[in-house]
């Protein structure tokens, strides 16, 4: 195995809630509460979980669009959170993000040409006369036509806009791209095109992806490893096939059993969870899944289960697999 | 969909085809769409009131620009042989107590009104809009500080401020312009801040930060073009009120020193006397009408622009669609009526 490109250690992000007449802090949203993972070079880590479990916050903290409350993020062994000025600029060239909604992520008052050349201009990567060439290359890379360069974003369909967003992310020649649900705003046939494009680009430019999604099938298709989050915590991480074949955490099992299988004859037993996703403002004590867990034990609401490696490359946070330590 | 498919097929384009694609486009398609969008925008201004506004504003601008060529008399030349003449073919709007032609003075007055109105509003925009966006962009206590300062400025009466400025730099058009400018800065700061706060929620601002765009670039390239519409509308409306403030201030004698007293407000104050009210009605009426029409024109234009730029009002209905809606309304009405009568029948039973 190659060394990890991105290493996240114990990432925590709380969003304060202000209220009352004096706008004092009256609570915190525990968006991400101690998440650790690493992504190897040229691989894809899929991050799945329900909406509101903190997937997007993890993605934004990883490329430092928002500063985490605590924790460390390493890029090539360097602490991203300590970057200042020039170093941060350099990091911006190396780590990019593609957002969920392509319709909102392009400035409606800028031509595609300007959108694509903007990052190059900001970082002064190329002399002025070569920018145009680079922009043409980029638009070709995402399979759009050069004639599109002089248009405005509202003249494109969702799939085309997402291609433009991907081209903008590629403009700086990054090594690492956070894909924040890049396909969830698109219809199914366009989703497939975008996914294939992303996989082609990964091979061609030796990219590393953090793929955030709630679609398990897409995640399995594109990811080498999959991490499952629940209410700000990472509950399980394993290679894509292993996670699907042998899910260990009860939440992962429930999640996978809810995933539709395109075979009407297939027999499967759905695990129906009771109750609702707990509020991240006031998360349950102990294991965050214990109020809904079908295999709950006495210890589960008393202390948090450690996040440990069960098998090589298979991590899980559940007392079912770490009884001896409790 | 079709576009996407075609795009995939074109993936292996060589540079020659690129070239053709680009030249093709720069010559025709873009021009056409931009032209179409502009015409579309113009067609949305087709409200009769807006057209009146546009006509008045264009007329004012023409009067101001062409005043030296179309004014029949010199506006400051005193001719005591023809004083206090009523309107006639020689003197369209009559003459004043010094025999000066009021029509010519009003034409020249348009120069002052438009100059002060436009310069003070532009100045206020140049100062206020960046302040407002910066305030929204930084947030926190800087935001609070800037907005409180704006509140203090908003509470300051423009007339007192103009008198103070005139005391410092001497009475004249520049004092009045600066006074109006300073007083309207907070209006733009507030509008810019409010719109910028809304725009900053958009993903493309976050995308700009992700590619490492510095704050100045985000403010001017990404936020500013997207909040232009409400500012433009406010500017048009504000030129009208600036003209009104100017008239008020120069009525108090804070405008240009003699003999350049052909500003509309100053004319009213100069001519205002018992005799003017009882005998020389034209001396007060025409400068007054000039102010009214000027303010009215800019306000109508501003209202029209606001409606044209409001995306929610952009829905333009075809005749067929209008007919369908009309039919639906009629049916609804008929239904209601029948419902009511049914009820009555029930009550009777």
Image (cartoon, coloured by chain):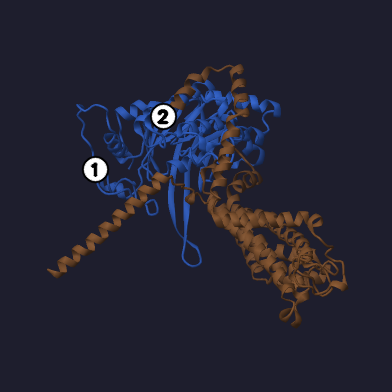
Chain colours: A blue, B brown
Q: Position of residue B61 (x, y in %)?
A: 71, 55
Q: In this figure, which residue is indicated by the disc labeled 2?
A: A190
Q: Earlier in the sequence, mark 2 or mark 1?
A: 2
- Which residue sits furthest left? B349
Q: Position of residue B222 (x, y in %)?
A: 60, 44
* Residue at point 52%, 23% (across, down): A206
Q: Quadrant of the N terminus of chain B?
A: top left
| SS label for mark 2 | helix
Relative placement, left or right, of A275 versus B11 is left
Q: Give the quadrant of residue B70.
A: bottom right
Q: Position of residue A87 (x, y in %)?
A: 64, 37
Q: Is residue B277 above or below residue A303?
A: below
Task: Please state the total of marks drawn on the protein image.
Answer: 2
Relative placement, left or right, of A39 versus A322 is right
Real-space Cα separation, disc 2 to disc 1, in angstroms: 38 Å
- Judge by depth and name the residue closer to the eye, B349 or B120: B349
- Judge by depth and name the residue closer to the eye, A297 or A230: A230
Q: Position of residue B128 (x, y in %)?
A: 66, 57
Q: Give the quadrant of residue A320.
A: top left
Crowd tier of the residue under label 2, counting other residues whose Cα lies within 10 Å: few below 14, some 14–19, many 20 or above: some
Q: Is residue B43 visible in the rendered structure shown here?
A: yes
Q: Which mark is residue A294?
A: 1
Relative placement, left or right, of B282 versus B256 is left
- Judge by depth and name the residue closer to the eye, B231 or B76: B76
Q: Is residue B142 visible in the rendered structure shown here?
A: no
**Which chain is indicated by disc 2?**
A
- Judge by depth and name the residue closer to the eye, B110 or B17: B110
**Which chain is indicated by disc 1?**
A
Q: Which mark is residue B50?
A: none
């Amino acid at each position: 195995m190659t060394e990890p490109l991105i290493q996240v250690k114990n990432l925590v992000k709380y969003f304060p809630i202000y209220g009352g007449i004096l706008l004092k802090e009256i609570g915190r949203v525990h968006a991400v509460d101690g998440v650790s993972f690493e992504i190897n070079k040229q691989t894809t880590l899929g991050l799945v979980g329900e909406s509101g479990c903190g997937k997007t916050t993890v993605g934004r903290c990883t490329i430092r669009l928002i500063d985490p409350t605590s924790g460390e993020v390493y890029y090539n062994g360097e602490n991203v959170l300590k970057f200042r000025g020039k170093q941060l600029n350099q990091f911006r060239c190396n780590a990019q993000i593609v957002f969920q909604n392509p319709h909102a992520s392009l400035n409606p008052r800028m031509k595609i040409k300007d959108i694509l050349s903007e990052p190059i201009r900001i970082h002064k990567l190329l002399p002025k006369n070569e920018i145009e060439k680079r922009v043409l290359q980029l638009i070709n890379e995402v399979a759009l036509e050069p004639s599109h360069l002089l248009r405005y974003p509202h003249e494109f369909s969702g799939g085309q806009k997402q291609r433009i967003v991907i081209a903008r992310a590629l403009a700086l020649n990054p090594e690492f791209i956070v894909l924040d649900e890049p396909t969830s705003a698109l219809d199914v046939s366009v989703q497939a095109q975008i996914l294939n494009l992303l996989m082609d680009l990964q091979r061609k430019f030796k990219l590393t992806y953090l793929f955030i999604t709630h679609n398990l099938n897409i995640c399995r298709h594109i990811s080498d490893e999959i991490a499952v989050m629940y209410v700000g915590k990472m509950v399980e991480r394993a290679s894509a096939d292993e996670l699907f074949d042998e899910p260990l955490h009860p939440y992962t099992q429930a999640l996978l059993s809810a995933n539709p299988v395109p075979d009407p004859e297939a027999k499967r037993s759905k695990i129906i969870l009771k109750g609702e996703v707990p509020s991240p403002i006031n998360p349950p004590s102990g294991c965050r899944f214990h109020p809904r867990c079908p295999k709950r034990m006495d210890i589960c609401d008393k202390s948090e289960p450690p996040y440990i490696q069960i098998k090589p490359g298979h991590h899980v946070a559940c007392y079912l697999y770490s009884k001896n330590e409790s | 969909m079709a576009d996407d498919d075609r795009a995939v097929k074109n993936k292996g384009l060589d540079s020659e085809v690129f070239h053709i694609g680009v030249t093709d486009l720069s010559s025709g398609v873009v021009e056409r769409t931009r032209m179409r969008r502009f015409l579309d925008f113009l067609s949305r201004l087709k409200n009769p009131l807006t057209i009146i506004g546009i006509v008045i504003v264009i007329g004012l601008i023409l009067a101001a620009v062409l005043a030296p060529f179309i004014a029949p008399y010199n506006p400051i030349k005193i001719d005591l042989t023809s004083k206090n003449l009523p309107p006639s073919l020689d003197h369209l709007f009559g003459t004043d107590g010094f025999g000066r032609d009021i029509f010519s003075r009003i034409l020249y007055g348009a120069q002052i009104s438009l100059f002060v109105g436009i310069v003070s509003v532009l100045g206020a925009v140049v100062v206020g809009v960046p302040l407002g966006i910066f305030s929204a962009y930084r947030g926190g206590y800087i935001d609070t500080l800037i907005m409180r300062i704006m509140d203090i400025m908003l509470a300051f009466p423009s007339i007192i401020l103009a008198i103070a400025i005139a005391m410092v730099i001497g009475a004249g058009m520049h004092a009045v312009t600066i006074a109006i400018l300073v007083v309207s800065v907070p209006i733009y700061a507030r509008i810019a801040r409010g719109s910028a706060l809304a725009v900053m929620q958009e993903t493309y601002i976050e995308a700009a930060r992700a590619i490492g765009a510095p704050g100045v670039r985000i403010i001017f390239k990404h936020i500013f073009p997207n909040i232009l519409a409400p500012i433009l509308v406010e500017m048009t409306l504000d030129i009208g009120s600036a003209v009104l403030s100017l008239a008020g201030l120069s009525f108090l004698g804070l405008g240009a020193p003699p003999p350049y007293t052909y500003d509309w407000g100053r004319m009213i104050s100069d001519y205002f006397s018992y005799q003017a009210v009882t005998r020389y009605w034209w001396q007060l009426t025409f400068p007054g009408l000039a102010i009214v029409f000027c303010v009215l024109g800019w306000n109508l234009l501003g209202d029209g622009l606001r409606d044209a730029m409001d995306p929610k009002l952009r829905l333009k209905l075809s005749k067929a669609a209008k007919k369908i809606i009309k039919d639906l309304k009629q049916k609804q009405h008929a239904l209601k009526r029948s419902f009511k009568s049914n009820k009555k029948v029930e009550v009777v039973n």
